[in-house]
Image (cartoon, rainbow, N blue to C red):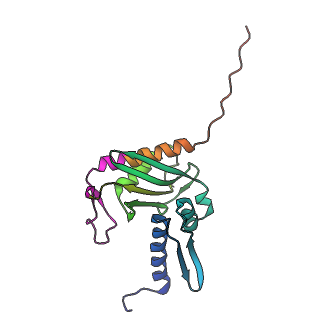
Amino acid sequence: MKFLKSDKTEGSYIMDVCQKQALSHPDVSIRFIRDGKEVLFSPGDSTLKNAVHAVFGKDISSNVCEVSYEKNGVRVSGLTGKNNLARPNRLMQVFFVNNRFVMNKTLYNAISEAYKNELMIGRHPVAVLNVELDARDVDVNVHPGKTEVKFASEQNVYEAVYWAVKNAISQAAAPREVFDAPQKSA
């Protein structure tokens, strides 16, 4: 007990773990009750959008588009925010590699580059992405917490994430209305 922090701090750590589990496994229902109140409930209906709704709320879940792409043995799936959805920090960028929560500069850089010229400077997109690749191509022993990873081919992972997100946001962009120019009369 002497190594634990305050109840509020420990509860926040548990909430973070529950949120990441709900996002990485939308097929599992998760209910977190804190001080007698339900603060998280994911339905477990195998729909990532519903898990995002449970974790981030309705405003986020209604402004995301589906991501699905595969290149060079790297498969990227999940959801990414439309161009009108941006945040001042990266807290709503959640990455999983083979359903394991990770933090990796290559992934952050790829998504930032995909949104280049789409968002204002200093704004960050919202994304929940799962990158699937052969387990032999991922080193999870970079950090004791197993949240930092290295890839055997950083370039392949970068390109797959970049194109997955770039394609998703370009398909979700609202079509622009084009008018014919008035004809000059001779």
Query: In the rendering, at what x and y percent does residue 53 appear?
Result: 58, 64
Region in magenta:
136-159
Query: In the rendering, at what x and y percent does residue 20 appear?
Result: 46, 68
The residue at the point 46 percent across, 49 percent down is 68
Q: Is residue 103 magenta?
A: no
The residue at the point 37 percent across, 60 percent down is 98
Residue 182 position by quadrant: top right
Return the residue found at the far bottom.
1
Residue 171 position by quadrant: top right
State the residue in front, 137 or 15.
137
Q: Is residue 143 magenta?
A: yes
State the residue in front, 73 or 53.
73
Please tell me whether residue 8 is drawn above or below residue 29 in the rendered image.
below
Is any atom of residue 113 visible in this view? Answer: no
Is any atom of residue 184 visible in this view? Answer: yes
Residue 101 position by quadrant: bottom left
Quarter of the rendering occupied by the C terminus: top right
Query: In the rendering, at what x and y percent does residue 23 appear?
Result: 48, 65
Please tell me whether residue 12 is drawn above or below residue 174 in the rendered image.
below
User: Is 51 displayed left or right of 155 in the figure?
Assistant: right
Please tell me whether residue 134 is drawn above or below residue 18 in the rendered image.
above
Query: In the rendering, at what x and y percent does residue 136 appear?
Result: 25, 57
